[in-house]
Image (spheres, rainbow, N blue to C red):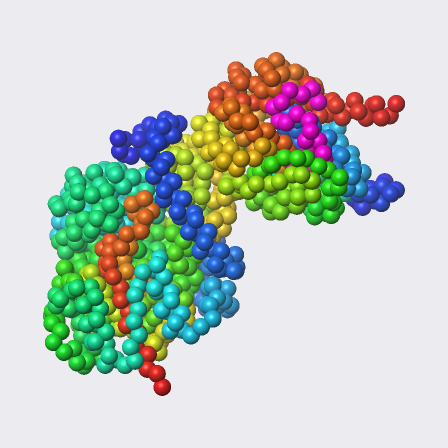
Amino acid sequence: MTSRDLILGKVRRALHRDGVEPGPVTAIAESLLSEPELGRPPLPEGDLRSLFASRVTLPQIGGTVCVVEDLRDVPAAVRIYLEEHGTESPVALQPDPDLMQLDWGGLAFTSGISPDQTVAIQKALWGIAETGTLIFHSAPNCATLFSFLPLHHIVVLEAKHIVAYLEDYAVAAGHMAVPRNANLITGPSGTTDIEGSLARGAHGPGFLHIIIVDKRD
Amino acid sequence: MTALETDFKPFKTRVEDALANRTLKVAIERTTGTARLKRAAAVSTWPNFAGARDLGRRIKDHVTSNLDHYLIEFERNAIASGAKVHWASTAEEACEIVVDICKAANAKSVTRSKSMLGEEIGLPLALEKAGITRVETDLAEHIVQLAGDKPSHIIWPALHRTREEVAELFRKHHHTPQNSDEIPAMVRSARRQLREAFLRADVGISGANFLIADSGAVCTVTNEGNAELTTTIPRVHIVTAGIEKLVPSLRHAMVLLRLLVRSATGADFTQYTTFHCGPKRPGDADGPEEFHIVLVDNGRTHMLGGDLNDMLRCLRCGACMNHCVVYRQIGGHAYGGTYPGPMGSVLTPELDGLAGSRDLVHACTLNGNCQQVCPVDIPLPTLLRGWREKSWNEGLEPRSVRRALWFWAFAARHPFLYRMATAVAVRVLRLFGEAGWVRSMPMAKGWTSHRDFPKPASRTFMEQYRAAQRRARK
Amino acid sequence: MSLSPSSQMGFSGRPRVGLFVTCLVDLIRPRIGFAALALLEQAGCDVVVPEAQTCCGQPAFNSGASDHARALAKNLIKAFELFDYIVVPSGSCAGMIKLHYKELFKSEPAWRDRAIALAGRTYELLSFLTDVRSYTPAGVSLKAVATYHDSCSGLRELGIEKQPRQLLSNVQGLSLKPLAGHDVCCGFGGTFCVKYPSISNAIVEEKARDIESTGAELLLGGDLGCLMNMAGKLHRNGSKVRAYHAAEVIAGMADGPALGEETSF
Ligand code: SF4
């Protein structure tokens, strides 16, 4: 007997059954979530963009935020950030069409991302107001390591892609193919492993800067 | 002395060692104290946390009572995503599977991101025996590995080490350590040191916080980002996961994630919550070429439907130990098992046998704080009491205890006899006392070696009450 | 005679209360029993102290000796089931009767039913006074600064937290200082404190420090076991803090000797 049969056999013996109709089980699972409010804390009043921004900049989360009106303003915002942090080294840019088509002026880029990358720029698929979370799905033009190797992680997020709750993301993601990696990122890397005291940049980025693009009309 | 050595000592000796270690007490309090405050703050900002906690309990119970369904659904979807799914009945089998995968991949070096299941099945030792270099990448596990320790907490495995001790370790083991006791500098040093290991590794091994049945994805949560570096860079990613980790869908996982993180660290969400689904896809810029999931039973099917069924809800958040008065005094190593604290005292007898862990189930005041803070309402005191009953019924309790309880129960069943015995007892007790207190009593050293015992009144309540009744009748 | 509890109501319409003093109070500190008696009478109850009472069986239950625990539970059920209420000056023993008796009789349905019926009428003293009898102490005064420790069973099993404070707030001259960790176990744990004395000691050592740092002169609580543990530690450490069961204070009996002070009564 394989271990698979052995384990499933023991499970079924413990549950006193030989098999199971999937339909009813799925229905019960669904009914557990019939009151979504039960499973989450209420969001404070406010528009999603400001809720997101105020969350992600909380000291315990540690992100920084700036808002620009148009995607075309992103390069300037990046330059300001780099100047503020005194980094001139070449930047890794995610080969995302929206980012690629921007006029980056004289900014130097690396090809791909290197293990000791100082800065990487990525575009997030969604932001979540509830938790201040950014979401990335791995794809040919979205390498997972962009979010983890650099010291400074700069993320472009369009305000229209900010949703209220984690579940809103789950529902939206449910309409697309499951990615190899879905990364939900909430602030820069941190650790409390030494005496419970928080230190940034444990393995992932030490800095997370979010440029929110909010078209005003 | 390392934790590995303490294992062979009896529980009471381990406890004495721990209690004598003042630094340990300071270290435990620094981390768990912060954790308690932060958890309380996080919970207080969620008006209906109790409702969510109850929902969490129902989700987990639903999964355990349909575990066959979810295992099959998960397996089917995981395979469809390109993952290889393995099943392991026992710890040994699970280790064998992992080692075989490493060997087939010709792996010399593996990175691991913290997984309590890995500790439970003895994976570190199995890799070592197979001659495979293992690098722990979670900062705490890295400290534990450098010190030759064992984890002493399921969330902060190195919580027993003070910053000074960590600085010392890093000075000894890191290539370019900073001569500093400052925590950020130590963290930077570990970052440099481990970055190399991430790049060198052939295989990355992680655990799983949740297995998502309807997509076949594996969820890991970390704050450091080490899980993603462990699982994205090497050619092979191996997940070891207990079969109780299943959840129906991503939406169910979100509810549990909220409960887990708040209970564990007091944050609302971890910095990195990642859903891994299969190997690298065509065109992907990174990701592992092989993706293996090892589903581990190791006693879980034995708990299913039995006395410990509730324990299968456990999210491994560590809140129960942060709030445990016993854990806070003796720390994790004194427990001697993989899992410390209240949840450990419930699991260790199941994993390692009751005879050797009888002390664990008794060394608890049953004050109930653990259940109160448990995000899925596991009745830990009741489960511990269940073990005590088993221990009693199997005759594992010492003769002295059995005899004392027998006499007490016999007397208490016979009120007349009981009245006489208690009347004598208070008079005898009073002989040991002076000025109201008994400072030392031969039969009650356990009490009087640490505290005074209040000298009883000269007559029992019942004697006095009866006398008063008689007076009133006259 | 009918066995239904309500028929036990006295002529006056006053509820008939069976007072279970608990084995510790019987043995160590009868004053708490008399305080309970007085308070219940003031709160308009006819109080009886059944002779057949001994121990609720909790030590056996928590030691895993369910057979012994069941025997004692049956004893107690028989002694008390004819009363309108059973009142106990201890959250831990009340919790045992209210919550755990039914677990003990999982496979004895007849006893289980009796246990459940009794559980519904079982109350811890202080919460009974406030919640069932709406009792407010009147004319009691005690000039003192006190602090209050919440014993775990009362707090977590029965949800008793406000009631003792509410009663104590009506004692004139008494001021209550908050105790850091008032809801953290004192390390007593019944037989735990003698089975694992050094762990218990480490816990109560911390508790004693917290109590001392409130600056209070009195330590109050609702469970004699925990009070003995804390007071015994405080006394061993040479502390001046004196301990009373809250019922003694509310009954105006706190002018007498505190726990461990020489007494014949
Ligand atoms: S028993 Fe509850 S509190 Fe303890 S680790 Fe498990 S989920 Fe967390």
Q: Is residue B381 magenta?
A: no
Q: Where residue B144 appears, x then y in whole percent?
A: 25, 41
Q: Is residue C126 above or below residue B413?
A: below
The image quarter in which residue A118 lies: bottom left
The image quarter in which residue B472 lies: top right
Q: Is residue C236 above or below residue B383?
A: above
Q: Residue at x 71, y 37 (%)?
A: C141
Q: Is residue B377 left or right of residue B106?
A: right
Q: What secondary structure predominates along the stretch shown in magenta?
A: loop
Q: Is residue C112 left or right of residue B273?
A: right
Q: Where residue C176 appears, x then y in whole percent?
A: 60, 41
Closer to the camera in the image, C250 or B231: C250
Q: Is residue B411 above or below residue C250?
A: above
The answer to whether residue B313 is visible is: no
Quadrant housing the C terminus of chain A: bottom left
Q: Residue at x 64, y 25 (%)?
A: C28
Q: Is residue B339 left or right of residue C45?
A: left
Q: Residue at x 19, y 80 (%)?
A: A102
Range of residues picked out in magenta: C246-265
Q: Where residue B376 appears, x then y in whole percent?
A: 47, 53
Closer to the camera in the image, C93 or A191: A191
The image quarter in which residue B149 lies: top left
